[in-house]
Every structure is written in C-alpha cells, then in structure tokens.
Image (cartoon, rainbow, N blue to C red):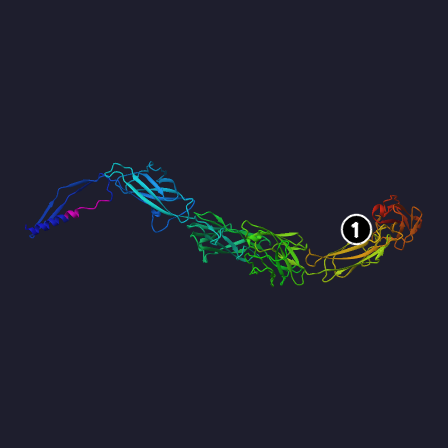
Amino acid sequence: MNVHRFAIAVVAMLCGVCSAVRPAAASPGAGLLITNVATATYRDGAGHALAASSNEVSVAVAAVSAASLGSGANACGTTANPFAIGPVAALRFTVVNTSNVADAYRIISVGATSGTVDGLAFLGPQPIDATVGSTISPTVAPGGSIVVAVSLATGGIAPGTAFQITLVVRTTNAATANGLQTVRATACGVAERGATIGSPVPAQTGPPVKLVDGLPSIAATSGTAVRYTIGYMNHGGMPANGVVLTDPVPAGIVPQANSATIDGRAAGAAASVDASGTLRIALGTVAPGPAHVVAFTAIVNAAAPGTSLVNVANFSATNAPAVASTTATVVTGVADVVFDGASGAAVSGATLSLVPAGGTSPAELSGMPVPPNANDANPFVTGASGAYGFGLAPAQTGAGRFALQVSAPGYKSRRFPLLLAPDAGGATYDVTVTASDGAPLALPGTLTLTHAASVKLADAYGIFGNLPLFKPESIAISKNVDRTQASGGDRLVYTIAIASAADPLGATTVVDRLPRDVLYARGTARVDGVHVEPVAAGASLTWTFPSLAAQHTIVFATVVAPGAVEGAALVNVATGTSVLPGTGAGTTTANASATTYVVGGVLSDRSIILGRVFVDYFGDGRFHKGDLGVAKARVFLEDGESVQTDADGLFSFPSVRPGMHALHLDPDSLPRALEPFETRDYDDPRSPIRLVHGPFDGGLLSDVQFAVKLK
C-alpha cells in the first residue's frame, strides 16, 4: 500500500467515525450510558474490500444543574409596559429547568427601583406564597417551568415613571456536577394613570355626556324618532379593556339596535337589545386620549303628555371603574311654545325675556343654545311656530330663581316665576312654573289650561313649559248713585251697568261692596227690570250671570244709617269678573265706583224701619217670586204711630228712636180674603207682632217682613 492509498484510507476511517456519531438529545438524563464504536471500510484498486472496527467507548452522562429566568411580556425593551398607579401591579417571571435533573428553586432576592414589593408567590398547581431566602418552589422536571409572581404597590409613583424589578433565583439540587446555579432577570414597566372612562372633553373631568337630538332634554310626540349620542374618552394612561356600554332605556323609548354607530361606523353585531329593552354595545379596548361617540336612534312610544323619560348610559370595563353618563330626557308632548290660551294657536312675534328673580333686565346666558334660539339670545322673539328656548349654564341653574316675561301684540303681558332645582351635575333641572297674574298655566307637554297654582317639569334643560297668552278682553262696567249728598235715613239708589267690551265673555259675577253706614234695602234689587235678590255676605252683594255679552243693568236701593259721620265719603265699589272664552279658567276683572258725601240732617240721630206685608203662598215666611204684596195694610209702632203699605206691600218708619221697637200688623186692615198666621213667636215673620232692634243695637237696618195667608 503506497502512501497515497494509506492517506485515503485514514480519511475514510475518520469520515466513518464522523458519520457514526449522532447528536445526543437535549439535556440527556443524568447517569445515561452512551456507547460508541468506530468502523472503517476500504476497497483497493483491484476491487478487494477491507474493513476494521475500533474498540467500544462508553461515557456516562453526569447530573448538571441549569436554569433560565425570563420576564415574558414585561421584558425590558423599546415597548413600554404600562401599569396603573394605585392598584398593585402583578409582574411574572418564568423559571425554566434547562438541566437534566429535577430541581426546585429558592428566591434569593427581589428589588424595585420604584414602588414597593409587597408580595411573592410561586404559581404552581397550587399558588404558594414565597419568602425571600427560605421558601422553596415545587419540584420542576427537566424541561418544565414554574412562574414567580411579584406584586408591586404603585401608589405614589408619578405618572410616566419607569421602574425595574430584578429577581434572583437559585437552584436547590446540590447533587450535580456543577453545583447550585443562580439566574437573574429584570422586568420593566411604566407607571401610568389607570384607565378611566369619562367626559369626551380632554381637559374636563366628569362623566360621559349623553344628549338627545344634541341637547340634554327635548320635547317629542309619540311616534317621533330621536337620536341619542354618548360622548366619552379614556382619561387614563393605559387602555381600558373589555369596555361595554349598556343603556337601560325607560319604558316609552324603543332603541333600534341596527341604527347604532361607533365613531360614525355601524356597530353591527356589537350592538343588541335584550327583552327588557336594554341596549348593549361592546366597545372592546378603548385607548387613552381620543374622544369617541356612540349613537343610536330610538322611537318615542305612547306616553302621557308631560312625562319625563329620563335615560342614562352605563360603562363597564375589566380594568376601569364603572361609570354612568349624564342624563338625557325626552319630555313627551310639546314644550316651550307660546300660544293663544283661548284657541291654542301659536303666537308669533312674542318677546320673551329670561330675568333673574325680582329683576327686569335680561340675564346673560352662557349655556348650550336651545333651538330655535340658536344664538341663545335674550330677549328672544318667537317665529311662526311660537317656539322658544333658553340655555342656562350649570352655574346659572344653581341660582334657582328666574322669571319669564312675555309680551305680544294684541295680548296681555304675563310674568312667569321659575324655580329651578338642578341635578348634581347641573346639566338638567326640575322647573316649577307659576304665574304672577294668577291666570291659567298649561299642563306639561300640552296646550291644556289648568287652574293649578303651578306646574312642574322634571329633568329638563332649556324647557320651561308652554306659555298661554290671553287677549285683552275686558269688562265694561259703570256705576252711579242717584244722590251725591245724603244724610242719615236717606235712601240711595245705585245703578250698575256691565257688559263685555269686546268678544262675549263666560260666567260672570258682580260683587258690590257697600261702604260703612250704607245698608241694603232687601227686596229692592232689580236685574234688567226683574227682581233678583243678591247673595248677601256681610257688606257684599253678589249677582251671577252664565255669560256676558249684552249689557246687564242692576238697580238696588240702600239707606244711609242714622249716625253716619257728617263729611264722610260713602264710596261704593262694584267689581265684575268674567271667565275668558275658551279657557275655562282665565278671568278678566273690572271695577267701578260711586261716591256720596254725608251731610247733616234732621234724622241724623234717628233710626229707620223698613218692611213688607205679603201673601205667603209658600207658607215659609219668606218672600218669593210669585208672592204678592198687600196694599193698604196698616202697621203700628208701640207708641201708636202707624203707616200704610204701598201698592207693593212696602212700608217704612223713617224716623224712630234708636233701640227696641214693637210692630203690630192690624188684621182689620187686611182684605177680607186674607188673615194673619196663628203663630205669636216674635221672631217669626208669620207673626203679626214683631220685636225689632234699631241699627244702633243690631248694627243693621231693620227690615221687617209680615207674612199673611189666604183664609
């Protein structure tokens, strides 16, 4: 064999050895015996094959300790790992057994550059709280792993502060060729404000803002479609995860899930409405910073006019506090309309001024404008719809008291005091409306008038109710007396004329208030020439009419009481009050007066007794329509003085001394067909003998009735 051939053979043998060696499996088990035999073959130029084998070599694998430690998602690098300030941050390290023997681990040390480590644990099948230097983890098989959780209290760390946590772990299996091994790893994080869902305005704290048709509250009739919007943003320094919006709309509002949008894009399957009518929209992860808007359409279902349908949206997240939005209110029916209280027609050209309570100058407005008042003008003039609106800022609603002054051509001006009770955020308020003139108000959500002293709207914004105006229909009333001067005992005849000055009016009352020392002569009143006794209550005489169009004339007699002070002015005032047509509640009032001056007279210290003798067909002692006066009947005083009745059965003693008197009806002076009643009770008008007090004793003019009967 020449040298060249030998070299080739050696190379071939070496290559044979190389091809026979196979890489061992990773981390072969300790004590594993590895054997190896090398073989070589050679064929010479003559085609003869030669082969040779080496001796067998055996190697036993030694036990080796090895481990790796990593911080996984919190590994330090170019990507920040945000953690919420305040809550405990949980960081995880993973220990991997890279040795060829089972091993367990002990935490040697842990440290943080910011915050405070307040907890360690091995997260095996059962979590085990760990103490540095002592607690040993469960045994980990070769190739297996165990997680070490480190809790870091982040309270007090400034936003944006980067921090590091360094963990040192050591193996515990000392029966290895290389002894115990120590591994180290560092996790990194950045302290940030926790996720917080709130107002869509970056610099503004507060809840998400919910509006309906762009306002905190609107009025809408049944069947109307309204559009809700909820603006929100994440004010924290880290994403809010698993964010869900739920909107439990009230009965009377029907949300349309297929109309929901998120930032203008259809929400699709993310939006749903359950059997209770609650709308649910899954918003997913909400990153810090940008503002977002969720919107959906709803139909206003039938509800009683004036009902406030209040709606609040709720936000929840897996890592953020739950929060509710501001309220959005739909007031069913119509609102904020100036209208004719008689016809219900809208009043255009009405000027409204919102003034502070007790003031007359318009308030400076700074709230969200309410259509149709796009510029929040104050005063504001209504258009053809009669609608108005005023936007008050939360700071203004806290003032509590305002008034609306309303005037329009052809109508009486009105002032409506307002009492506002704002909610906690000041976005909406309850408003109670009254009327300074006592005229009717409108029921909430309607043009129906009410006698109530006030009406109330709940959870409103810019809505103060429908305001009725009334035309200046008035009563034309006049009064005169037949004498401008009189003395005690004189008879005064008053005449009242009353009519509508414009359109016919409704139910009407006329109240005449007699002055002191003027006494009504009962039975003397005539209305349009017909005897109609007034309802007497003290010094007031009242007549009523079902309506007032044509003129009514009231005539009645009085007597000046003896002892009236000379020089006194006897002012008699009559007041007419009528219901405005079509309102059932509104009234108009007018007054008229007549004056007589007292002068001295011969009867100034004397009393007067008036009376009547009549045929009492009803037998109750009272003069009724249909009863007849008895003419030429004679009535005596206790001193023998007597008078005869006139054609109507009336009589009078114009000058008698003050005090008690006895009157006697002479039965012989009666016509043959008549006779007195049998009673002798001096207080009974059916008695022919009567005892009476003069004005100085009883305080009233004496009016004595003598009732007689047919035989």
Q: Residue 174 in the image: state x and y as whole percent.
A: 26, 36
Q: Residue 245 in the image: state x and y as whole percent.
A: 47, 51
Q: Residue 277 in the image: state x and y as whole percent.
A: 51, 51
Question: Please, is residue 139 above or below residue 399 in the view?
Answer: above
Q: What count of labels does the image hold?
A: 1
Is there any visible trace of residue 232 in the rendered image? yes
* Residue 503 vs residue 166, the one in the foreground: 166
* Residue 601 vs residue 701, the one in the foreground: 601
Name, please, the residue furthest toward the left. Answer: 1
Say few, some or many: other residues with alpha carbon within 10 Å of mark 1 (under 14 / 14 to 19 / 20 or more).
some
Q: Residue 544 in the image: state x and y as whole percent.
A: 76, 55
Q: Residue at x 81, y 51 (%)?
A: 516
The residue where tag 1 is placed is: 539
Q: Determine whether, in the image, residue 127 is placed left or right of residue 332.
A: left
Task: Tell whether position 693 is magenta.
Answer: no
* Residue 417 vs residue 704, the one in the foreground: 417
**The residue stretch that appears in magenta:** 16-25
* Residue 554 vs residue 590, the one in the foreground: 590
